[in-house]
Image (spheres, rainbow, N blue to C red):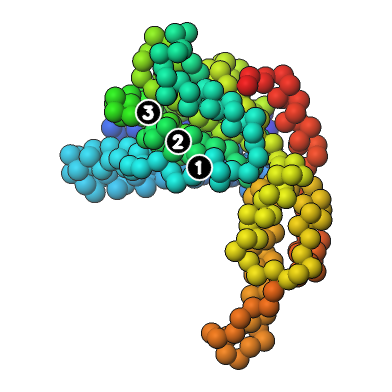
């Protein structure tokens, strides 16, 4: 067995031991075992800087550090205070009292995705009597980062006036070590309780970190996935009248486990914008800027082929920074100076220094996965 494999074995042993002690309430011993797991994971990274699993090891180490901090904090509190604090941190601040202030009009393009989401969530919420066979409760949004997945989830929550519960998958796996499956159950119980008054959307970002295939399983990760699948089965039952939806987003759909994919009846590709959408995005983000007469948004949209909506926003922001910085660098009384109009040359200089955040090879991979698993 190589050094990395031996250290991995030790880290796994200490992690499992820590989780067991954590579950038993033996906090001091759990802290000690978590620390040993951290030490071995960091040794792997130091010894093998190019090791393919280093990112996962570092994520696990950070998760254990956070759990150690939580355990140390609870040791300084009375048991009742610690229990109330943990319960509040996990759930009270998850539920937004008002739907996000995002509408369909705020999202440029993505007509296929909008239509699929309306069919799956909006229409059944408005007229459930028209859907005796039930309707999808699991919606998977996949595609490159920065193309509007989160905006789509927020917009549909706003349209149906739903409670919006945003959950970061990585935080589930880190904050809830030792009691993960119980807390996933609590999350869904909270959603069912809220759904008695209004629809509920649980939005899980980067869901591949929760339900992705992993070589390195530690502690309760398998249990939390099984619990999540069990809860999903409960809400997708067509006999269930509650309007609880799980909208998940991922940049890496190929990392998802097949059992998880099956629970999501709608699998919607959110691609980078085409030419028309890029043009509309440039119009949107340049609207508040002072532009020179030589600005050619059509040309900019063509030059930005492959750019995501987020990339285009970054370009417009960079141009704004470029022009505004001249005031601070060249004007003595910069508090009263006004920036010059932004010219086409400013945009071209910024675009020369930027590339799309998603490669053509990656787009081919998204298309391939979509053709294999699409469910609009």
Name the residue nearer the viewer: 286 or 326.
286
Indicate the position of residue 112 as horizontal and vertical percent values. Answer: 65, 30
Q: Residue furthest bottom?
A: 332
Q: Quadrant of the C terminus?
A: top right
Label 3 sits on a secondary structure element that is: loop
Residues at discs 2 and 1 in contact (Cβ within 8 Å): yes
Label 2 sits on a secondary structure element that is: helix
Name the residue nearer the viewer: 73 or 208.
208
Q: Dot 1, how many residues are within 10 Å of its Cα: few (below 14), some (14-19), or many (20+)?
A: some
Q: How many marks?
A: 3
Indicate the position of residue 195 as horizontal and vertical percent values. Answer: 33, 26
Residue that label 1 marks:
103
Q: Quadrant of the N terminus?
A: top right
Residue that label 3 marks:
199
Q: Residue at x 75, y 28 (%)?
A: 367
Q: Residue at x 80, y 39 (%)?
A: 360
Residue that label 2 marks:
159
Viewed as shown, does residue 170 lie left or right of 53?
left
Indicate the position of residue 83 as horizontal and vertical percent values. Answer: 23, 38
Viewed as shown, does residue 129 lie left or right of 12?
left
Q: Sequence order check: which comes first, mark 2 or mark 1?
A: 1
Q: Is residue 132 visible to the viewer in this orientation of the structure?
A: yes
Q: Sequence order check: which comes first, mark 1 or mark 3?
A: 1
């Amino acid at each position: 067995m190589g050094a990395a494999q031996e250290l991995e074995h030790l880290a796994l042993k200490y992690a499992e031991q820590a989780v067991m002690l954590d579950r038993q309430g033996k906090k001091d011993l759990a802290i000690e075992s978590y620390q040993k797991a951290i030490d071995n994971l960091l040794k792997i990274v130091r010894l093998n800087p190019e090791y393919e699993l280093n990112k996962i090891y570092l994520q696990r180490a950070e998760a254990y550090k956070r759990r150690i901090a939580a355990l140390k904090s609870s040791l300084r509190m009375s048991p009742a205070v610690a229990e109330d604090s943990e319960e509040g941190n996990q759930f009270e601040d998850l539920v937004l009292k008002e739907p996000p202030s995002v509408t369909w009009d705020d999202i440029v393009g993505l007509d296929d995705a909008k239509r699929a989401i309306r069919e799956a969530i909006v229409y059944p919420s408005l007229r459930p009597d028209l859907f005796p066979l039930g309707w999808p409760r699991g919606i998977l949004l996949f595609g490159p980062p920065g193309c509007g997945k989160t905006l789509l989830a927020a917009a549909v929550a706003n349209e149906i006036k739903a409670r919006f519960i945003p959950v970061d998958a990585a935080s589930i796996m880190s904050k809830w070590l030792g009691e993960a499956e119980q807390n996933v159950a609590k999350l869904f119980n909270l959603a069912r309780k809220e759904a008695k008054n209004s629809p509920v959307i649980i939005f899980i970002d980067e869901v591949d970190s929760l339900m992705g295939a992993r070589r390195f399983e530690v502690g309760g990760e398998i249990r939390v996935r099984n619990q999540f699948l069990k809860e999903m089965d409960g809400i997708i039952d067509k006999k269930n009248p509650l309007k609880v939806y799980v909208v998940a987003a991922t940049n890496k759909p190929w990392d998802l486990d097949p059992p998880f994919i099956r629970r999501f009846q709608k699998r919607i590709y959110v691609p980078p914008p085409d030419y028309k959408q890029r043009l509309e995005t440039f119009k949107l983000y340049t609207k508040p800027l002072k532009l020179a007469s030589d600005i050619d948004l059509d040309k900019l949209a063509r030059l930005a082929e492959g750019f995501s909506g987020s990339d285009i926003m970054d370009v417009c922001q960079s141009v704004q920074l470029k022009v505004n910085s001249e005031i601070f660098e060249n004007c003595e009384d910069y508090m009263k100076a006004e920036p010059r109009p932004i010219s086409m040359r400013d945009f071209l200089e910024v675009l020369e220094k930027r590339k799309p955040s998603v490669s053509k090879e990656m787009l081919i991979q998204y298309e391939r996965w979509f053709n294999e698993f699409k469910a609009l």
